[in-house]
Image (cartoon, helix red, strand yellow):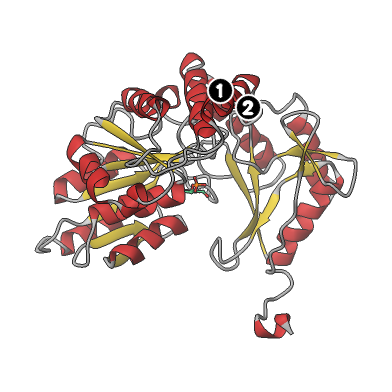
């Protein structure tokens, strides 16, 4: 009955699988079995979600401040640790000011609505994350999509907007999580400055991994980026998010953003976990570049085995398969070999481009690549 009301091809139907934590932080266990699978699927790039220092910080905060903040930021929800993390992130990223949000999805809605209104044209990369599109829908702005990472297409579109009455907004990501690719952000920032457009960059997957000392690809750009969006749900290993920008934009968010004002403040254990993760990333400035180097050697090895070289230079390596069922079959085969990598299918990715999304994490044991290559070879 339900299936008839909501017909979906079996190869496209999603189901919620649950996973137990494995013995080691880089392992996951299917609750129905005993086998430990190597985690090549999570976004816990630096292996911080179970890092003892991060866990201890979250537990200590929970013991002293409670599980929840108990109110929104403007009522009773702000603890000194919120302000400390905001100021620490602002210094690390060299931005005037940072505001925390309960999630990246929410932060992105706030970012787009702060920089656009009904008459604004928002130019987004064709493969932009759903939360940014939700932001455009909320603000009622006009949407235009430019070809993926294509500065020439963006330039032509901005050119056509030269008589626009409101400042156009360009939106991209520093690491596209299903493609593994990154834009030429310097070129894009220059282009935006040249055309007088604002630039919003979602660094959800880049922070902690890409850029100088893991500070993301926006760090050190000569031209201004109006807002940088970051999440603690990926390399920081916990949950929650933030926006970083200049004083004027951030004050506007504080005074007017419903997504910031009318929601319970980020839970104290998550704030403490993010602070501990930030401290660890700062004291281990080569973590990100080492992970990227390792990813490069994986790319080369996959290419030598006959796969198209996965694009980009970060820890996301998609293996393009094409058909939905083929991608699911490959996922299944890798699982049999003790490796967890998840098939990503449309509508998350464009039609005909189903893929296996391989994700590297810093703590993967020696021999993981060889295990993967053997599993791929056996098919
Ligand atoms: C590019 C991108 N932006 C934003 C988000 C949302 O972040 P969060 O998980 O903190 O809501 C995600 C997570 O899926 C993402 O991949």
Q: Nearer the viewer, mark 2 or mark 1?
A: 2
> At x 52% / y 39%, what residue is drawn?
68
On the image, the x and y values in percent for residue 48 come to 60, 28
On the image, the x and y values in percent for residue 338 come to 83, 41
Considering only vertical position in the picture, is 4 above or below 123?
A: below
According to the image, label 1 marks what residue?
290
Query: Which of the two residues, 378 or 315, is positioned nearer the viewer here?
Result: 315
| Nearest to N terminus: mark 2 or mark 1 | 1
Query: Which of the two residues, 19 or 70, is positioned nearer the viewer here?
Result: 70
According to the image, label 2 marks what residue?
362
Query: Which of the two residues, 316 or 64, is positioned nearer the viewer here?
Result: 64
Viewed as shown, does residue 9 lie left or right of 189? right
Q: Are marks 2 and 1 in contact (CB under 8 Å)?
A: yes
Determine whether the residue tagged by mark 2 lies in a helix, strand or loop. loop
Tell me if I can see residue 39 in this picture.
yes
Neighbor class of circle 2 (other Cα within 10 Å; few <14, some 14-19, many 20+) is many
Tell me if I can see residue 151 in this picture.
no
Q: How far apart, in angstroms, are the residues tagged by discs 2 and 1? A: 8 Å
Query: Which of the two residues, 38 or 83, is positioned nearer the viewer here?
Result: 83
């Amino acid at each position: 009955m339900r299936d008839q009301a909501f017909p979906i091809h079996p190869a496209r139907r999603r189901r919620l699988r649950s996973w137990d934590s494995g013995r080691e932080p880089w392992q996951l266990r299917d609750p129905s079995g005993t086998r430990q699978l190597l985690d090549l699927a999570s976004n816990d790039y630096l292996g911080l979600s179970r890092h003892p220092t991060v866990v201890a910080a979250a537990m200590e905060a929970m013991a002293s401040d409670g599980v929840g903040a108990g109110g929104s930021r403007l009522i009773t929800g702000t603890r000194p640790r919120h302000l400390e993390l905001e100021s620490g992130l602002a210094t690390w990223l060299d931005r005037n000011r940072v505001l925390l949000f309960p999630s990246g999805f929410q932060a992105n809605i706030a970012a787009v609505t702060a920089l656009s209104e009904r008459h604004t044209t928002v130019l987004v990369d064709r493969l932009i994350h759903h939360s940014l599109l939700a932001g455009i829908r909320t603000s009622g702005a006009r949407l235009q999509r430019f070809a993926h990472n294509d500065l020439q297409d963006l330039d032509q579109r901005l050119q056509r907007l030269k008589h626009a009455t409101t400042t156009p907004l360009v939106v991209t990501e520093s690491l596209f999580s299903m493609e593994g690719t990154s834009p030429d952000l310097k070129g894009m920032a220059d282009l935006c400055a040249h055309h007088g457009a604002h630039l919003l960059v979602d660094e959800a997957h880049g922070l902690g991994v890409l850029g100088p000392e893991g500070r993301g690809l926006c760090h050190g750009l000569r031209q201004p980026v109006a807002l940088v969006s970051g999440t603690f749900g990926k390399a920081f290993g916990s949950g929650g998010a933030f926006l970083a920008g200049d004083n004027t934009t951030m004050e506007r968010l504080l005074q007017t953003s419903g997504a910031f004002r009318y929601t319970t403040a980020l839970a104290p254990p998550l704030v403490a976990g993010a602070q501990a993760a930030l401290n660890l990333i700062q004291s281990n400035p080569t973590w990100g570049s080492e992970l990227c180097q390792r990813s490069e050697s994986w790319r080369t090895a996959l290419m030598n085995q006959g796969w198209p070289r996965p694009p980009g230079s970060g820890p996301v390596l998609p293996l393009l398969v094409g058909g939905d069922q083929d991608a699911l079959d490959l996922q299944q085969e890798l699982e049999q070999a003790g490796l967890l990598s998840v098939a990503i299918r449309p509508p998350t990715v464009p039609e005909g481009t189903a893929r296996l999304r391989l994700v590297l994490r810093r703590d993967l044991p020696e021999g993981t690549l060889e295990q993967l290559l053997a599993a791929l070879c056996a098919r």
